[in-house]
Image (cartoon, grey):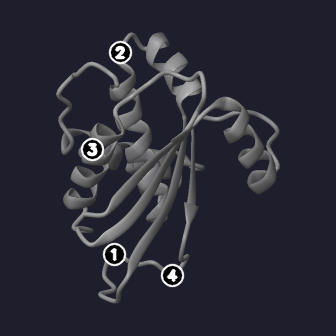
Amino acid sequence: MPTQVKRRAPKSPNVQKKQVCEIADAMLNRLGLISAELSVLLTNDGNIRNLNREHRNKDRATDVLSFHFDPRFSPSRNDSPRVLGDIVISLDTASRQAAGRRRPLIVELRWLLAHGILHLLGFDHARPSQKRKMDAWTRRLVRSAPIVLRKAG
């Protein structure tokens, strides 16, 4: 499963890119998207704020952004390559959220990965019914990617 993880986050909390990749791959497997390609960028608040401003007209940092590579992507299509898209996560925001929830950063990243992947698949949370459905699927994906806590590096 070709998930690629890159880090462009000077002075931000450190995580193992390999572990993030393993989590994303487990989620794609759970969704039956074994051959889908996913790119994950771990960045900082400054970089994600710029992306949020440029693409969503919101001049603030956020925890996760999702960018479709091909808006026609469908889990049922068998053409290749199956590029799902890009997920960008701010390690700074994720770290603050993890601290506020009293959980390890990698656990917060797992939740944000699930959330981002679901957005790439067309899920939304604007209405209460959409939020319930997306939250239920987020929990399924989180359960599909158990975490072995390791030292960051």
Residue 132's image quarter? top left
Mark 1 crowd level (few <14, some 14–19, many ≥20, 10 Å Cα): few
- The nearer-to-camera label among 1 and 3 is 3
Give the quarter of the figure containing the C terminus. Answer: top left
- The nearer-to-camera label among 3 and 2 is 3
Q: Earlier in the sequence, mark 3 or mark 2?
A: 3
Q: Which residue is painted at 44% across and 24% down in the image?
A: 14
Against 107, is 35 above or below? Answer: below
Check contact, mark 3 vs mark 2: CB within 8 A. Answer: no
Residue 24, given in percent of the width and then of the height, sits at 31, 50
Residue 52, given in percent of the width and then of the height, sits at 73, 46
Foreground residue among 48 and 139: 48
Amino acid carrying mark 2 in the image: Arg
Disc 1 designates what residue? 75
Disc 2 designates what residue? 103
Mark 3 crowd level (few <14, some 14–19, many ≥20, 10 Å Cα): many
Disc 3 designates what residue? 23
Disc 4 designates what residue? 72
Check contact, mark 1 vs mark 3: CB within 8 A. Answer: no
Amino acid carrying mark 3 in the image: Ile
Residue 105, given in percent of the width and then of the height, sits at 39, 22
Give the quarter of the figure containing the N terminus. Answer: bottom left
Residue 27 in sight: yes
> In this rendering, would 120 be left or right of 49?
left
Marks 3 and 2, how far apart at CA: 17 Å
